[in-house]
Image (spheres, rainbow, N blue to C red):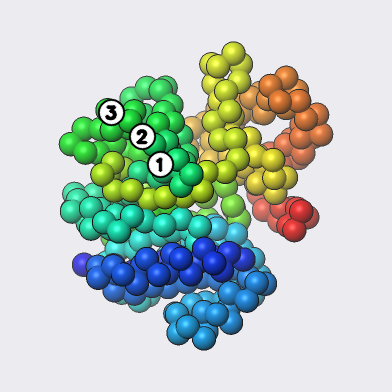
């Protein structure tokens, strides 16, 4: 199986260099392809001088655009498996070998752990078959069956995807820019009947950021808050699009209620309410351009 690693980068040259150093140590990786999202920190020049295969895009297309470009490029390069990751994560040395030991999956990845504290997850996950959301690696290990959490994966953080699945479901939605593109790709794969899972023995480290899974409504649910206006706008725009397509309008309305509640009562930021409503309106009517006003902010 020809494994092609796809890395999307933007203005994090030192972290990119760390990651590429790790990837070059792995004999299972046939090729490393870097998509540079129009970085302004010298990334393009360094990639050129280091002889790393890369494509520097004319403008920043976000993670969604970067992975759409990179995954399509990997398929053109004859990849049987594409291994997808951002520039700020790093796989443990045996991560890929552990993943490749599972030949019974179409879309699968490692446990994504907080680099600052590898005993906890970088991104909380909802265990299949219920409403339980876990934050600790110990809870994931306890819930695993045959070393796997089925139907759960954190896309674009050290995940493998087969050529056959890409040919069936296509590429990520580039217009999403950031936030929600990974969920959409996962839900699309699930709808297509893909075999999906998290291999708990495979570990991938990633900086823990934002207040993901902030409790609200007396702990009955959580909300993915971000202090970044850009991230919040894209989340509020893209989530309703995904919910309408894959879960139905009642879930869109629940998301709207949660958003208003969160920014009025849980973490009061009243200005976030009209921003959120504008973002939802933009997404549901198919306008994926307005995030540009938040770039650089």
Instruction: Locate residue 168: give its quadrant.
Output: bottom left
Label 2: how many residues lie within 10 Å, few (<14), some (14-19) or many (20+)?
many
Image spot of residue 190 (x, y percent): 36, 42
Image spot of residue 55 (x, y percent): 52, 77
Q: Nearer the viewer, residue 23 or 162?
A: 23
Pointer 1: what residue?
Answer: 118
Task: Tell us which disc is closer to us: 2 or 1.
Answer: 1
Instruction: Locate residue 19: give its quadrant.
Output: bottom left
Task: Tell us which disc is closer to us: 1 or 3.
Answer: 1
The residues bearing labels 2 and 3 have C-alpha atoms spaced at a distance of 10 Å
Q: Residue at x 65, y 46 (%)?
A: 231
Q: Nearer the viewer, residue 113 or 157?
A: 113
Q: Residue at x 63, y 35 (%)?
A: 225
- Residue 281 appears anywhere in the view: no
Instruction: Locate residue 295: give its quadrant.
Output: bottom right
Which label's residue is closer to the chain start, 2 or 1? 1
Which label's residue is closer to the chain start, 2 or 3? 2
Q: Residue at x 34, y 63 (%)?
A: 82
**Residue most extreme to the top:** 218
Pointer 3: what residue?
Answer: 143
Q: Secondary structure at mark 3?
A: helix
> In the image, 104: left or right of 141?
left
Q: Nearer the viewer, residue 49 or 165?
A: 49
Label 3: how many residues lie within 10 Å, few (<14), some (14-19) or many (20+)?
some
Which label's residue is closer to the chain start, 1 or 3? 1
Label 1: how many residues lie within 10 Å, few (<14), some (14-19) or many (20+)?
some
Task: Tell us which disc is closer to us: 2 or 3.
Answer: 2
Pointer 2: what residue?
Answer: 137
> In the image, 9: left or right of 103?
right
Q: Secondary structure at mark 1?
A: strand
């Amino acid at each position: 199986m020809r494994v092609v690693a796809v890395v999307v980068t933007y203005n994090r040259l030192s972290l990119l260099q760390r990651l590429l150093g790790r990837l070059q140590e792995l004999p299972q990786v046939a090729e490393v392809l870097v998509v540079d999202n129009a970085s302004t920190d010298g990334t393009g020049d360094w990639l050129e001088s280091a002889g790393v295969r890369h494509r520097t895009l004319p403008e920043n297309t976000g993670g969604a655009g970067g992975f759409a470009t990179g995954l399509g490029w990997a398929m053109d390069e004859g990849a049987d498996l594409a291994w997808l990751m951002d520039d700020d994560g790093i796989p443990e040395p045996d991560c890929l070998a552990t993943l490749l030991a599972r030949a019974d999956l179409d879309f699968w990845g490692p446990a994504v752990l907080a680099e600052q504290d590898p005993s906890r997850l970088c991104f909380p996950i909802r265990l299949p078959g219920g409403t339980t959301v876990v934050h600790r690696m110990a809870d994931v290990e306890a819930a695993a069956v045959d070393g796997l959490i089925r139907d759960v994966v954190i896309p674009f953080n050290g995940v493998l995807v087969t050529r056959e699945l890409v040919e069936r479901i296509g590429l990520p939605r580039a217009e999403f820019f950031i936030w929600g593109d990974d969920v959409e790709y996962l839900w699309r794969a699930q709808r297509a009947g893909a075999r999906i899972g998290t291999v708990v023995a495979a570990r991938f480290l990633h900086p823990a950021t934002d207040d993901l899974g902030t409790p609200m409504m007396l702990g009955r649910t959580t909300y993915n808050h971000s202090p970044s206006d850009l991230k919040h706008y894209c989340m509020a725009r893209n989530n309703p699009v995904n919910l309408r397509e894959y879960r139905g309008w009642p879930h869109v309305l629940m998301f709207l209620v949660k958003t208003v509640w969160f920014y009025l009562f849980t973490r009061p930021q009243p200005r976030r309410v009209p921003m959120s409503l504008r973002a939802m309106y933009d997404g549901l009517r198919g306008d994926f351009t307005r995030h540009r006003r938040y770039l650089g902010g």
